[in-house]
Image (tube, coloured by chain):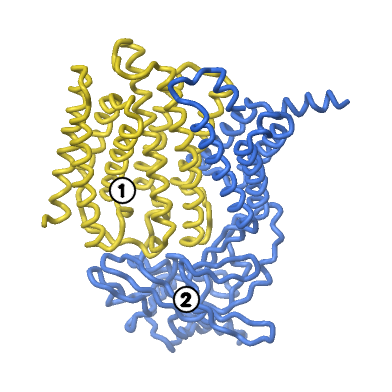
Chain colours: A yellow, B blue
Amino acid sequence: MFADGAWLPIALGLYFAAALSAVIAVWRGRSVSTAMTLLAIALACHTVAIALRWVRLGHGPYVDLFEVLSSNVWSLHLAVLIAALAFPRIRASLAAILPLLQILVIWLLTVPERDTLAPVTYDTVWLPIHVTLGKIFLGCTVVAVGLSIVILIRRHRPEAFSVLPRCRALDELAYRFVLIAFIFETLMLIAGAIWAQDAWGRYWAWDPLETWAFITWLAVAGYLHQRAVWKPSPVLNAILVVGIFTLAFSTFFGTPFISTAPHKGAI
Amino acid sequence: MMKTLHGGLRRLASLRLTLACLALAALIALAGDVGGWPTGTLIAVPFVILFVNLAAAIATHGALRTQAGLFGFHLALACLALLAAIDRLSGLSGHVEVTQGTAFDPTLVEARIGPLHPGSLERVRFVQGRFEIDYAPRLKRRETRSTVYVPDDTGNWHPVIVGDDTPLVVGDYRFYTSFNKGFAPLLSYIAADGTIHSGAVHLPSYPLNFFKQGNVWTIPGTGREVKLWLHVPEPVFVEDAPWRFRIPDDAVLVIMDGAQRYELRPGDTVPLGGGRLRYEELRTWMGYTIDYSPMIPWMLAAAATAALSLAWHAIGKLRRSDWDRATGAEERAHVR
């Protein structure tokens, strides 16, 4: 059997191939079934890589940038595959979202892979619960982003993605994914607060990650409310969804690795 | 009269006010992160307004009350906003250092204290015992086991083990060990008039500041400052192997009184400032974080209720209509 480090490049190559296949298929007006197959194989390889590393190190992919990035590349691709399987009519949106996810794949290739040691405070059941809820939140958001990108592309090229439903329907589906994301983000914050209470003796301390996670929550709540207040156009909603994802992405991928917050552990 | 009251309530229930509250909360959080504002206290302002806004919305929007999921979510969120505001206004979040062999002194606590805090920290009593800290290679801190002695109702003292995730709970205060800990030379100063002053000087956290184990100490009754530092020939920590925090065997306390340098070992005495300084022994100190958040169980219940109610609402909404047949009218019916 290959070591965990050997499975990852195979998975990353397959993710890239899936993205390329989806773009070409939609460009030629064909089905994205090949892209979905490649995506499923990539996910299987990546699952093996993460599982082997987990068994070898004795902890999940929570500690450093490589682990967090790798697990999110896995979970975000899994989310778009599940969405494509559950909603066959939006499968062509894979051509919009998969290329975006390849930015993460390329980033992952640049991050050194080192063995890590989980801080003592990570030894709690609330950490995997917190992380899983966060991944579902981000996964639902990324599906909404894929639909929003289609809406934004159609603004300039109305004939694009002609196999997909009209913009208002895509906007409604994106809204539903954001609504589900909001629930999981709320649960993620609750689980995180319980973990923080266990680990550091306070459920909330306004450290940079907590502050930006709270701002992200407020942004999603604001998005949901503004739809009821102003009934905005699908284009404006799409811009807001992309904005929310950018904010969430910066929060979860940027803040933990540029701050000295307790989320990193301490000597 | 009733009409005026209802009109006022409707204005308070405005969705625009909800959005303004969310924006204000985000601004305060941002100001705390970027500008160092006291977010923990200031955030109570939008939370209180949000509570009023949501309570008014529940009272005036019939659609909100007829949809159980939305009703539960907004009610729970209103309660959460109020509870969070109360918690922050009455809470305490601080830290303290306690020398091994001495009692916890509430006057040494540095804390952010809410204006409604009941202020009963004076009732907390415990004495610091020894502690153990295990380290993994590359200075990764692992388990901390700090023994403190706590009195019971009969006056007997019992040992309690405190850790990073195992608090000492006294009243509603919770004490947790932190990464902050170090060495503390115990000094006795016999002044010229025979008065004896004893105390410990806390050196910077170890091993974080292993390269600057020094501090300034004021000679009692003189106001004169001398520099002191701990010279540790062999570091206690091991860079590439597991090790346990301990007092160094061969440490020397160096005192600099102007140009005069003294090197002391436990039991040594030197003339200083007209009196005599005796270096008794080297002890340790442990840093604790202190938290007082009386609303936690209620906040957890409200937050869980809010999340589950929203989930209930979302499931109902997803079942009621197809996403690709949704219209503006349908949206209006489902969202207040």
- Looking at the image, residue B64 sits to the left or right of residue A17; the answer is right
- Looking at the image, residue A103 sits to the left or right of residue A204; the answer is left
Can you identify the residue that label 1 sits on?
Answer: A68
- What is the residue that sits farthest to the right in this orientation? B1
Identity, as a three-letter code, of the amino acid under mark 1: Val
Question: Relative to A25, is A48 above or below?
Answer: below
Residue B218 or residue B46, whichever sits in front: B46
- What is the residue that sits farthest to the bottom in this orientation? B267
Identity, as a three-letter code, of the amino acid under mark 2: Ser
Can you identify the residue that label 2 sits on?
Answer: B146
Q: Chain of mark 1?
A: A
Q: Quadrant of the N terminus of chain B?
A: top right
The residue that appears at 58% across and 73% down in the rendered structure is B222
> Residue B273, can we see it?
no
Q: Check residue B183 in the rendering and tell me which mark sits there, or answer none.
A: none
The residue that appears at 62% across and 31% down in the rendered structure is B18
Cα–Cα gap, marks 1 and 2: 32 Å
